[in-house]
Image (tube, helix red, strand yellow):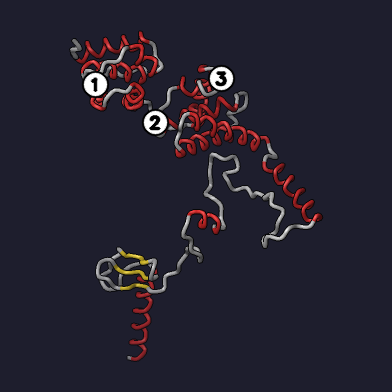
Amino acid sequence: MIGLASRQAKSRKQKESIGTASNVCNACASEVVFIDQARGETICSNCGLVLSDRSIDLGPEWRAFTADEQNARQRVGGPADWSKFDQGLTTIIGRQNVDAAGRKLTSTRRAQIHRLRKWQIRTKVHSSDKRNLAVAMTELHRISSQLSIPYSIRETSAVIYRKALRKRLTRGRTILGMIAASLYLACRVHKVPRPLEEIVDQIHITRKELSLCVRLILRYLNLKVPQSSPVEFVHRFGTELGIPGEAKKKAIDILQLAREERLTIGKDPKGMAAAAIYVASILTGSRRTQLEIARTARVTEVTVRNRYKEMVEKLGISTT
């Protein structure tokens, strides 16, 4: 009997330890727990049972009350950044000729550190791929800053370019053209499309060469890039034209009707968005000329006029 009781007590302790380790309440079998970081306790959110009172604090042992003080006390670098050619993980030898205690180095030690610093800079771009990435990521930062591209899209474009470089797609192509094509495709992946003409304005290559780079990446990397929708251009073009929100909403409604009538198939999304904005501006009393809309959308007046006539005729819209 004593042996049976001891075995039962032992199995009960094992169950309790398993329940605590897996954050399962021993009383109500609930898996919803609350971790109090200040007290170091793990509490069941259902019945309030304290599952553990000895949680390990994985944070730093120091405290900081200002942003400068926090940055000064941090002992690690930033997260990995794909838009940097070394992903931000390369060790940097500082130029302060002092040791960890703040004492000045001797002349012999300074000469040694100077040689180490020089070789460290040389070895960062020792291969052709590293040199290629160093140039490409510099151009990526320049183009994305001029176009106000957010960080997430810049990261995606850097990943696309690295895949193209690994596939040796950059051979025979300019670095500028391939990084611009990667940025254009990343904008489409995040459904924030930018016209090719807008990217061409920031680089020194032709639209034809940029289109070839885009098709090359799509062919060999098997990217799932969604087609640009005319609705995605409405807010941007409308903001640049200064039309009210009512006109933007009306333009989106017109484009949705045009899609249901299959008028958008095979048409340039920029041209469809421009024509819808033109129709909406007339209907809402905030009229803009075809020339203004064409320049904003980077299409011709003929395109705006033709798409406008198709919409009015097929959708039965009266603009008079």
* Disc 2: which residue: 192
* Cα gap from disc 3 to disc 1, whole angstroms: 36 Å
Instruction: Check the image and report above or below for 256 versus 299.
Output: below
Q: Tell me the crowding category of disc 1: few under 14, some 14 to 19, or many 20 or more residues within 10 angstroms, Cα based.
A: many
Label 3 crowding class (10 Å Cα cut-off): few <14, some 14-19, many 20+? Answer: some
Q: Is residue 197 visible?
A: yes
Q: Is residue 229 visible?
A: no
Q: Judging from the image, what secondary structure is the residue with disc 1 in?
A: helix
Give yes or no for contact between labels 2 and 1 (Cβ–Cβ under 8 Å): no
The amino acid type found where label 1 is placed reads: Ile
Residue at the location (54% across, 17% down)?
Answer: 206
Q: Where is residue 291 in the image (x, y as percent from the top left)?
A: 36, 11
**Tag 3: residue type?**
Ile
Which secondary structure, mark 2? loop
Residue at image mark 1: 254
Tell me residue 287's x, y (percent). Answer: 26, 15
Relative to residue 100, is residue 191 depicted above or below?
Answer: above
Earlier sequence position, callout 2 versus callout 1: 2
* Residue that carries the numbered disc 3 in the rendered image: 205
Q: Residue at x 35, y 83 (%)?
A: 9
Please report whichever mark, 2 or 3, sits nearer to the chain's N-terminal start.
2
Q: Which numbered circle lies on residue 310?
A: none
